Image (cartoon, grey):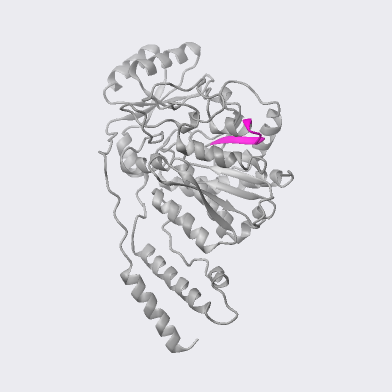
């Protein structure tokens, strides 16, 4: 390439980078909910009588339960308003039920959770400018005989900037920007599929990762972000995507298996946790009442409306007006139903508790192939090194919860359907500091090899 030609290219890139429109700032449309003075308590019932006492306290004070389990000596995590703390301390002391305050001020924990968020900065701007130069260079070279734009973009895999890292939790625009970056930069490997729109009009994206275009290989589905406040879930899902697409050492995981990954199934709720209410759980749909949204993991159409759900529109476990009433769950069910013969493993990522949960979840019932499912889950859990996961039936280990996505996936014929409750076990709960993102992601990823090896033996 001549010096004159190089000068022209650099001049064009410089001009384009300095005339690009600035990204608009996110508008704040609602007051921010403060959790100043709220505490997370972990109480440990030692027998059935104490469990019933805790249940009555929860009902009397309308306490939000963050975690519970069926067995005695398993802690129950409760979010306690400052209005009730003095009285509840006395009642627990009278009942001689041991408890500890795991988070002394919830708002402080929220403020400290995500200190290094990369919303903007010189690093991203520099990366974006470099990417713009590479795109223009690839396009220019395509004019020469024997060269084509597609080939050249494949030689510049970082031709599109993005803001994602795994040192902080990211907003939905950052996540979607990263998915578009991958689709643009690796078109032979990544297809970004919009399967519908959320209630507030955000696209619902599924990333298809495949080394072939035939769609005849068995597949693994992974989703995250069903519950809005479980930020570690989309972080792990996007980390998996990065490893599969951008790390050549993981090419083996693509040879015999396709992947469908949906990092954020509930984008409206997820964005709302960043702008207005960090502990929001549900979708953001209109219910016709003062309370918005439904619990998407009670909205799937298998045993809908059963145990562990509520008809109360203000409840955290409101199951919706009917099965698949939420556009998010409806879009997912339509997409997966069309590929049920291809998808052999369904993994839905949640937090917290460190469990690999097996259907059925609607009640303490076991599928006929439960032992086979448990064997595979135990093999996967054996790959974890930093965090220990408990494997077992959802309703037996925790509590019945009808209308869950894993039960529904199992009901339509996806044999290996699991819910994974990610770290931690309760010290931070849903407000897991960003410093845990990489340890959790890196610990989880090797377990996927177990599922790949199993799926590769199955026929579509």
Q: Which residues are magenta?
A: 411-420
Q: Is residue 412 a member of the stretch shown in magenta?
A: yes
Indicate left or right for 27 with 66 as reference: left
Q: Residue at x 64, y 57 (%)?
A: 213
The vertical placement of 125 against 57, above or below, is: below
Indicate left or right for 371 with 70 as reference: right
Residue 140 image offset from top left, x and y in percent: 48, 78
Residue 438 image offset from top left, x and y in percent: 49, 49
**Quadrant of the frame with the C terminus:** top right
Q: Quadrant of residue 155?
A: bottom right
Q: Nearer the viewer, residue 212 or 378?
A: 212
Q: Residue at x 48, y 67 (%)?
A: 159
Residue 161 image offset from top left, x and y in percent: 43, 63
Indicate left or right for 434 with 289 as reference: right
Q: Residue at x 50, y 28 (%)?
A: 323
The vertical placement of 390 against 253, above or below, is: above
Q: Is residue 154 a member of the stretch shown in magenta?
A: no
Residue 353 in view: yes
Q: Nearer the viewer, residue 75 or 401?
A: 401
Q: Nearer the viewer, residue 41 or 350?
A: 350
Q: How many marks?
A: 0
Q: Quadrant of residue 65?
A: top left
The vertical placement of 308 against 221, above or below, is: above
Residue 422 in view: no
Q: Residue at x 27, y 39 (%)?
A: 32
Residue 195 image offset from top left, x and y in percent: 51, 46
The vertical placement of 27 against 348, above or below, is: below
Q: Nearer the viewer, residue 12 or 68?
A: 12
């Amino acid at each position: 390439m001549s010096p004159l030609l190089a000068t022209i290219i650099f001049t064009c890139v410089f001009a384009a980078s300095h005339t690009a429109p600035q990204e608009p700032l996110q508008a704040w449309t609602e007051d921010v909910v403060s959790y100043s003075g709220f505490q997370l308590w972990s109480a440990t019932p030692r027998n059935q009588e104490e469990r019933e006492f805790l249940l009555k306290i929860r009902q009397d004070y309308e306490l939000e339960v963050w975690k519970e389990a069926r067995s005695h000596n398993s802690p129950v995590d409760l979010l306690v308003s400052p209005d009730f703390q003095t009285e509840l301390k006395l009642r627990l002391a009278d009942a001689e039920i041991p408890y500890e305050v795991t988070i002394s001020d919830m708002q402080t924990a929220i403020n400290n959770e995500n200190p290094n968020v990369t919303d903007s900065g010189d690093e991203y701007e520099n990366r974006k400018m470099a990417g713009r130069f590479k795109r223009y260079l690839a396009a220019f070279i395509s004019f020469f005989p024997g060269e084509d734009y597609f080939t050249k973009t494949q030689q510049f895999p970082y031709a599109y900037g993005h803001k994602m890292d795994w040192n902080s939790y990211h907003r939905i625009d950052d996540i979607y920007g990263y998915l578009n970056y991958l689709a643009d930069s690796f078109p032979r490997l990544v297809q970004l599929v919009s399967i519908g729109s959320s209630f507030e009009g955000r696209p619902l994206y599924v990333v298809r990762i495949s080394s072939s275009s035939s769609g005849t290989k068995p597949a693994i589905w992974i989703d995250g972000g069903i519950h809005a406040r479980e930020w570690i879930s989309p972080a792990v899902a996007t980390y998996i995507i990065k490893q599969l697409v951008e790390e050549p050492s993981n090419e083996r995981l693509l040879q015999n298996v396709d992947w469908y990954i949906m990092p954020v199934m509930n984008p409206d709720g997820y964005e709302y946790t960043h702008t207005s209410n960090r502990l929001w759980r549900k979708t953001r749909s209109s219910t016709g009442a003062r309370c918005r949204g439904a619990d998407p993991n009670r909205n799937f159409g298998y045993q809908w409306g059963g145990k562990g759900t509520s008809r109360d529109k203000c409840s955290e476990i409101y199951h919706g007006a009917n099965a698949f009433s939420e556009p998010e769950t409806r879009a997912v069910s339509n997409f997966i139903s069309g590929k049920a013969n291809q998808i052999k493993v369904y993994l839905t990522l949640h937090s917290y508790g460190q469990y690999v949960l097996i259907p059925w979840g609607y009640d303490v019932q076991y599928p006929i192939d439960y032992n086979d499912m448990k064997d595979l889950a135990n093999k996967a859990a054996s790959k974890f090194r930093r965090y220990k996961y408990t494997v077992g039936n959802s309703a037996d280990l925790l509590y019945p919860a009808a209308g869950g996505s894993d039960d529904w996936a199992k009901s339509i014929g996806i044999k290996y359907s699991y819910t994974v409750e990610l770290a931690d076990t309760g010290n931070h709960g849903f407000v897991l500091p960003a410093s845990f993102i990489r340890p959790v992601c890196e610990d989880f990823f090797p377990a996927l090899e177990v599922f790949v090896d199993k799926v590769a033996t199955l026929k579509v």
